[in-house]
Amino acid sequence: FISVQRYLEDRHAAGTAVVPDAESATNQFLGMIANYVLWPRMLLADWSPAPADVGRAVDEAVTTMLARYGHSTDGPQHS
């Protein structure tokens, strides 16, 4: 958790992302991944997603984070 939060704080400080609340953004990011990878495994004994499916879940979480927090010079930023 802390390493992801620090990464987002660093990206915000560098101006390559707009992440005013890195703790909340970290929770969002890890929550998206855990929703597919962790929670079904905790509740379903036979849940074992293929590595490609896990990779897809992570890619989708990254795409969502970039859409929300990625730095853009084309328009207003979220705060």
Image (spheres, grey):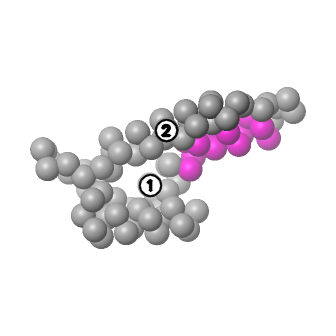
What range of the chain is rendered magenta? 30-42
Q: Is residue 33 above or below residue 16?
A: above
Residue 6 lies, in percent from the top left, at: 46, 69
Q: Is residue 43 above or below residue 31?
A: above
Helix, strand or loop for disc 1 = helix
Label 2: which residue?
A: 59
Residue 32 lies, in percent from the top left, at: 55, 41
- Residue occupying the point 33% across, 41% down: 67
Mark 2 Cα-neighbour bin, 10 Å: few <14, some 14–19, many ≥20: few
Extreme residue in the right direction: 45
| Residue 36 in sight in this render | no
> Looking at the figure, which quarter contains the N terminus?
bottom right
Disc 1 from disc 2: Cα separation: 16 Å
Q: Amino acid at mark 1?
A: Ala
Most common SS among magenta residues: helix
- Residue occupying the point 71% across, 40% down: 39
Residue 65 lies, in percent from the top left, at: 40, 45
Label 1: which residue?
A: 25
Q: Earlier in the sequence, mark 1 or mark 2?
A: 1
- Residue occupying the point 57% across, 46% down: 31
Mark 1 Cα-neighbour bin, 10 Å: few <14, some 14–19, many ≥20: some
Q: Quadrant of residue 37?
A: top right
> Looking at the figure, which quarter contains the C terminus?
bottom left
Helix, strand or loop for disc 2 = helix
- Residue occupying the point 54% across, 41% down: 58
Q: Nearer the viewer, mark 1 or mark 2?
A: 2
Q: Does residue 32 belong to the magenta stretch?
A: yes
Q: Nearer the viewer, residue 61 or 55?
A: 55
| Residue 47 in sight in this render | yes
Q: Is residue 32 left or right of residue 70?
A: right
